[in-house]
Amino acid sequence: MTWETIQTQVHQGVATLSFNRPDSLNSFNRQMHEEVQQVLKNWNTDPDIRVIVIRGNGRAFSAGQDLKERAGQLGNVPLPPQGSLAKYYNPLINLIRQSPKPVIAAVNGVAAGAGANIALACDLVIAKESARFIQAFSKIGLIPDAGGTWMLPRLIGYARAMALTFLGEPVHAKEAAEMGMIWKMLPDTEFDAYIDDIAQRLAQQPTYALALTKQALQRSAENNIDQQLELEQNLQYLALSSQDYKEGVQAFIEKRPAQFTGC
């Protein structure tokens, strides 16, 4: 399909979604929300898609909400169930967090406000050295949304989360990697090649087991040790019953590379 606010590409099991409103730093308007959600819903259920990469065109990953779209609505604030968080941002975060595919955020530039938190919701966050993350909400009198108040304390601790959200100061990619906010920072010249390489590597992995691993890690924040042990045994049962496990064991015995299919 042809989209107006995004670009998509699928190659060898790797599906790439590029935010494509570079003149507005890939900020989200209603149409972009709708297009992104439609694509992710389709990809999440497509057995031929093994990995999803989310990135931005131009010099930004995403600047979050398009405030120009909101300018005429300042005096008409909808109740929470009818607001943009309930309609757009919360479903988007859930599509990423609950995706059965590994989701990579390829942060090519500034990620601000909800744009930063959309990136942080992904499974692997890889940023260019020149990228920046900004919790810009306090600058306009808002609280962090798109899951920011849940993810930040877990990623970087309470003290840092408070400082970044209160002050709204930019965090450069190197510092973000050092504090554990993201997984990796790369020199700008190495970024694209690395994203292609890591996506292809993941696409060849047993992605069904990766989806189960994702569930286990996400649930660990709310479980005590006994609950987590029970969850592990239940998810491991599913993994042991998979074709990928059988292929992995057979490939090990035959001393050959495994050919995983994600099921």
Image (tube, rainbow, N blue to C red):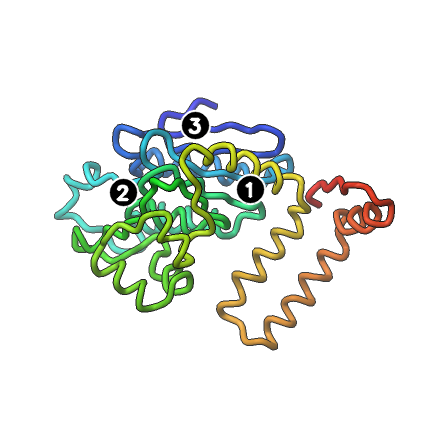
Q: Earlier in the sequence, mark 3 or mark 1?
A: 3
- How far is disc 3 from disc 1 in space, using C-alphas? 17 Å
Q: Earlier in the sequence, mark 2 or mark 1?
A: 1
Q: Residue 30 lies in what quarter of the image?
A: top left
Asked whether the beta carbons under mark 2 and mark 1 sit within 8 Å of each other, the answer is no
Q: Secondary structure at mark 1?
A: helix
Residue 44 marker: 1
Q: Amino acid at mark 1?
A: Asn
Left-right relation of 97 to 173 = right
Q: Residue furthest left?
A: 75
Residue 23 at x, y = what percent?
Answer: 26, 28
Label 2, label 1: how far apart the Cα atoms are: 24 Å
Q: In the displayed orientation, state which residue is furthest to the right.
A: 254
Q: Position of residue 21 (x, y in %)?
A: 32, 30
* Residue for badge 3: 7
Q: Residue furthest top?
A: 2
Above or below: residue 259 compared with residue 214:
above
Q: Which residue is mark 2?
A: 65
Which of the marked residues, 3 or 2, is nearer the chain's N terminus?
3
Q: Amino acid at mark 2?
A: Gln
Front position in the image: 246 or 129? 129
- Amino acid on which the number 3 mark rests in the picture: Gln
Of 101 and 249, nearer the camera is 249
Q: Is residue 238 left or right of residue 14?
A: right
Query: Is 128 placed left or right of 245 in the picture?
Result: left
